[in-house]
Image (cartoon, grey):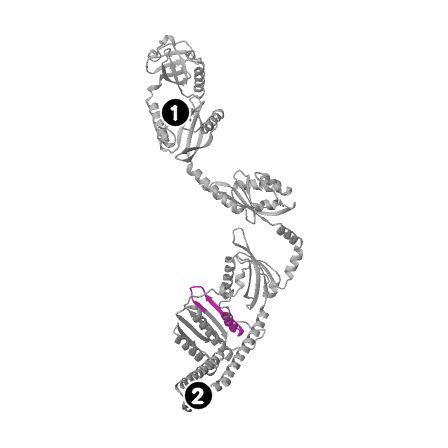
Amino acid sequence: METFDSNVNIPNGKVVCLQCTERGIVSYVSPNVSDLLGMQPDQIEGKEILSFLNSKLSGKLLRLSLKCKKDKTSEGLSFNWKNTDGKELELSVNISYNLDQGYMCVLMPHYELPQQKEKIRRQQDVLRSTLESIDDFVFLLDKDGKFSDFYSEDNSSKFNNINNSFRPGNSLADAGFPSEVETAFLAVVKKVISTGVSEELRYELKAFGSKLYYHARVTPGYNSNKKIEGVIVVSRDITTLVNSELKLNQSLNYYLTVFDNFPTLIWRANRFKKIDYVNNTFKEFTGRSFEEDKGDGWHKAIHHEDKERIVKEFLRKFDQQKPFIQEYRILHNTGMYRWVKDFLHPFYDFKGRFSGYIGNCIDINDIRHTQKLLQESELRYRELFDNVPDIVFRLNQKGEIQKINKAASQILGYDSLEGKNVWDLFLPQERRLVYRQFEKIISDGKKSFSFEVKVFNNKGEIKCLQIKGFISFDSVKTVSEVYGIARDITMQKMLEKSILKNTIATEERERRRIAEELHDGIGPLLSGLKMYLQQDSLKVNLEVKQLKTLTYCRELVDESIRQTRSIANNLTPGILNDFGLEKALKSHVLKINAIGKFDVNLHVVNIQENLEEEVSLAIFRVVTELLNNSLKHSDCSKVEIVIDERNGILSGNYSDNGKGFDPLKIQHTNAGKMGLNNIRNRINSLNGNILFNSDEGMGLFVKFILPVKQSEVTGSDKPFL
């Protein structure tokens, strides 16, 4: 408010109207001016209105008048009128301009505006209610750091460790603040008043045997003349926040201790883009101390040709707060520069606020050197790539062929395979097996692989390939590319099949020979011994003990005959040779069912009576081996066996409801491997095919197929699907 002096005592009055010329001469004033200002109209009329005001208020009124004239608007101004006895009256004046009449002024007591006073009162109530509803502690300090006022009566209850001495004029020390806190506040107050810029302050207080932490925001406080006459302090209890930060720092320090022993180079930059940590591996690699690298010191370790690029990229990417990768040369402890690959990831505090970056450097100097050598020999590599007799390929993560050499056309007959999906080349029953193998390789964390697979050539013929290669992963551990070499082993497999067939045939001949030796050699001897021991004349004049010995000898001979017959039958089942496959299988199933461990249902359909001996023997051996495995390992309660022959193809299905197994896991261990291999070898030796479908807890299903009419193996033979 503006004030000016007058020797006139002003009683309360009503609205007074004044009219002034453009030069500010009062041409008219309403008669009731004496009621408001205590001056008669003739004391005012004909005089300059600015002569009644002090210089400061005169300047404001003059500028306001010119604005009304220029913008053709009405403007208002409030001020204080002070008479000689020191009493003040708050007045309001409203000015407008008319071209014909000049300036029109309406003067009235300011306190006679009830709407304005009510508005101010409501604003003050809202402000007071707002301040009382928040948890922050709000108070005002003057230029000397003394309490000048409180916004809220409830403020004192928000500091449970400070007494209630917050009266205006008291110091912070009077209110219970420690001297060091008061000194810090006074320094901040002085700075805010001098600069007009808000400041923040964190301080500690002790209460109930523990520390309390506070954060204060100190902002300048202005008077009606827009001059700083003190500060407004909003203080908040951040004890919980600080304790959480302390725990977080302890956790970070723990992990940084762990990082010290990591084999890779790890560093950390704070949110100000300054290095504040490097691990021991980093220091050992560079031979530099942390003091040399902290802040921006790490720039000196970067090769001069890479420094500008790396620092510029680092600062630009840092503001994006996203992961990125850099490659550059860094000084090694040998004095040489080595290439490193730096993986940078942003990290955040417990409130999710960006706190900086953590970098993980890997020494790729040897890789870069190798890449350089590869680039230099790219022409020779291409020549080698195209002239290798084996198929060399590269696949993307979808299995699409990205690169493949000329050998693929020679082996598989296709003009071009690039862009095609490799899964389309596999036999249907091979796809699931290959997919499971890749799943296992990836889950085991391996990169290299080796397996055999059957594929179609462009004529629909089946080729057997031996594939070896490795898997490349991207930064998020997903498959990016697959590299490998595929060798055509079709002829090798055919040769192995021929050898396997001869081996099995030799094995069966040897079994038959041993069985015949048992049957024709040991069998008659045991039978003769049995006949001799059965003679009644041997019992004559024998004592009781001798009779028991004779009886025991007879029983041993009977058991020996049974065991010899069983061994001979297992070596070469006579019932198979005498009565055929169907009766041999039914006889064996009866023996299994007699054990009572599980029920076996056998269905034999359309089997030829004159089925070739080696086919009958192979199927008999496969079924008995599968039943033997079920007895030992499956814990099943039911087995279903179906043997069927149609259109010259004999097929068999074997299933049980046992605990099952993982065929891939069995393939890589010794458990059950011998039995499964024997089964697979017998079927493959007869140019057939067999499929094992099982999983842990899901039982077992086996399907095998064989050609009924088998000829000698020739180069034109192809395995059945």
Position of 580 relative to 696 (above/below)? below
Residues in magenta, as a range: 675-701
Who comes first in sequence, dot 1 or dot 2?
1
Could you say which disc has been placed on residue 533 in the image?
A: 2
**In the image shown, does 208 or 587 lie closer to the viewer?**
208
**In the image shown, does 82 or 274 lie closer to the viewer?**
274
Q: Horizontal and vertical percent for residue 629? A: 45, 71
Secondary element at tag 2: helix
**In the image shown, does 511 or 60 lie closer to the viewer?**
511
Q: Is residue 690 located in the magenta-colored stretch of the structure?
A: yes
Answer yes or no: is residue 346 visible: yes
Q: Amino acid at mark 2?
A: Leu
Secondary element at tag 1: strand
Q: Residues within 10 Å of mark 2 (few under 14, many from 20)?
A: some
Can you tell which of label 1 and label 2 is closer to the viewer? 2
Residue located beneath label 1 in the image: 149
